[in-house]
Amino acid sequence: MAKSIDTPVLNIAYEESGNPAGFPIILLHGFPDDIHAWDDVAPPLAKAGHRVLVPYLRGYGPTRFLDAAAPRMGEQAAIGRDLIDFADALKLPRFAVSGYDWGGRAACVAAALHPERVRAAVLVAGYSIQNVFAAPRPAPPEMEKRFWYQYYFNTERGRAGLKADRRALCRLLWQDWSPTWRFTDETYNRTAPSFENPDFVDIVIHSYRHRLGNAPGEPRFEAVERKLAERPKIEAPTIVLHGGDDALDRAPAQATPGEHATFPKLVARRVVPGAGHFLPRENPEAVSSAILEVLASSR
């Protein structure tokens, strides 16, 4: 069911399914995507008796800023705060969360800073909180090549290119990041209208410039970003999933010591073969079963 709700900053559009009295699960999409990423993940969760909530992130679909003068920023502290504001607006004292890409980062931020709110988490590609105050180390050349879009967005040419041809550019990213996924025109065209949101370009450009130190953050999030720069642990029971064919996430087969330190209550860590960056779309069963598993472990 399509709904919307006001938070202090946004009117957030979202889909809801399942038992209104069930334990809530919030599913967060990434860039460039929208709530349809979870179309095949939500039904098993609803069938199990949960209340399933799938919001459009800031800058996507029908979600809108309440104040026309509000800064259009996509920094990690902002999207993490949006998640908590969404839960507050719905009067959810506790919830489970799953996300990937931007949604995974928002889930990490909320879980790290508000452990009393997040009962359990399933994080695609693992821990993604960034220290935006330190210059990021260059990745190996092969990976740097895969991040071309980030450097493109850090130029005015990239802003103009995204604004002028966002559908073709975002489709190219789907193809690049999930090279073994054969999605249809119908699948892509169901989501592409979400990129016509009037704030989409500004939010995307700010996100990729801020994380590389090329755009200021929103002043109200300065203290939050300082906390995030310390890379706080996520104390909630967590399952980490990696797509085996994700072009942006070359995860080792086994969990690293760093992962165990970051997730003290790591329930499981899996590399899902045959799936790329858009794991909820490519193997929804792996994600829905992980969510039910981690919830069962957190009782």
Image (cartoon, grey):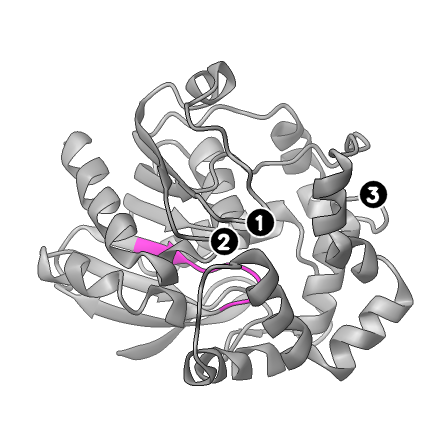
Q: Residue at x 27, y 70 (%)?
A: 16
Secondary element type, mark 2: loop
Q: Which residue is mark 1?
A: 247
Between 256 and 293, the residue placed more toward the observer is 256
Q: Are marks 1 and 3 in contact (CB under 8 Å)?
A: no
Distance (Cα) linking label 1 and label 3: 24 Å
Q: Residues within 10 Å of mark 2 (few under 14, many from 20)?
A: many
Q: Are marks 1 and 2 in contact (CB under 8 Å)?
A: yes
- In the image, residue 60 above or below residue 142: below
Q: Is residue 218 visible?
A: no
Left or right of residue 165: residue 231:
left
Distance (Cα) linking label 1 and label 2: 7 Å
Q: Residues within 10 Å of mark 1 (few under 14, many from 20)?
A: some
Secondary element type, mark 3: loop
Question: Is residue 284 highlighted in magenta?
Answer: no
- In the image, residue 201 above or below residue 291: below
Left or right of residue 204: residue 128:
left
**What span is colored magenta in the figure?**
26-33
- In the image, residue 241 above or below residue 45: above
Q: Quadrant of the N terminus?
A: bottom left
Camera-nearest label, 1 or 3: 1
Q: Residue at x 34, y 64 (%)?
A: 38
- In the image, residue 228 above or below residue 160: above
Between 52 and 69, the residue placed more toward the observer is 52
Q: Earlier in the sequence, mark 1 or mark 3?
A: 3
Choose top left, top right, bottom left or bottom right for residue 18. Answer: bottom left
Numbered badge on residue 277: 2
Q: Residue at x 21, y 69 (%)?
A: 17
Residue 241 position within the rendered picture, expressed as x and y whole percent measured from the top left: 38, 40
Q: Residues within 10 Å of mark 3 (few under 14, many from 20)?
A: some
Q: Which residue is mark 3?
A: 213
